[in-house]
Image (cartoon, rainbow, N blue to C red):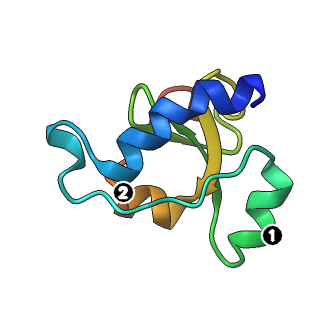
Amino acid sequence: MNLFSRALAPCLALILFGAGAGSAGAQPLSLYQDEAQARLHCVGDAVVWLDFQTRRYYAAGQTRYGRGRHAVFTCRSQARRSGYRRSVFGRR
């Protein structure tokens, strides 16, 4: 098990099995370590950087896009359906 898998496992458990008030209607997500993998899956949808700790997502061009230890790429529509909110921080 690599470092990424060990760091991501607790976050995935929270997303997939639900915990806390904010995830009552959460849907499972397709998560990708690499932006290119996400682009192949998210045809016709924007790829976003999903931050598990803040439950926010960042679009390409934002300051925090692609940065962070507890985050991955996914499709914007999946992030919205799972209860993640768009971040306005670092918006250009």
Badge 2 or badge 1: first in the primary sequence: 1
Residue 49 at x, y percent in the picture = 62, 42
Q: Which mark is residue 40?
A: 1
Dot 2 falls on a residue whose secondary structure is: loop
Residue 36 at x, y percent in the picture = 85, 56
Count residues near mark 2 (Cα–Cα under 10 Å), then give few for <14, some for 14-19, many for 20+. many
Quarter of the image holding residue 86?
A: top left
Residue 43 at x, y percent in the picture = 72, 77
Most extreme residue toward the front is 1
Look at 36% across and 40% down and name the residue there. 14
Residue 53 at x, y percent in the picture = 42, 25
Q: Amino acid at mark 1?
A: Leu
From the viewer's side, name the closer residue of 18 and 35.
Answer: 18
Most extreme residue toward the right is 36
The answer to whether the residue labelled 2 contacts the one labelled 1, judged by CB atoms less than 8 Å apart, is no
Dot 1 falls on a residue whose secondary structure is: helix
Please state if 28 lies on the left or on the right of 50 as rendered.
left
Q: Which residue is mark 2?
A: 82
Look at 64% across and 22% down and name the residue there. 68
Asked if 69 appears above or below 82 in the picture, the reply is above
CA distance for labels 2 and 1:
20 Å
The quadrant of the picture occupied by the C terminus is top right
Quarter of the image holding residue 37?
A: bottom right
Q: Amino acid at mark 2?
A: Ser
From the viewer's side, name the closer residue of 52 and 1.
Answer: 1
Look at 68% across and 33% down and name the residue there. 5
Look at 64% across and 63% down and name the residue there. 46
Asked if 4 appears above or below 76 in the picture, the reply is above
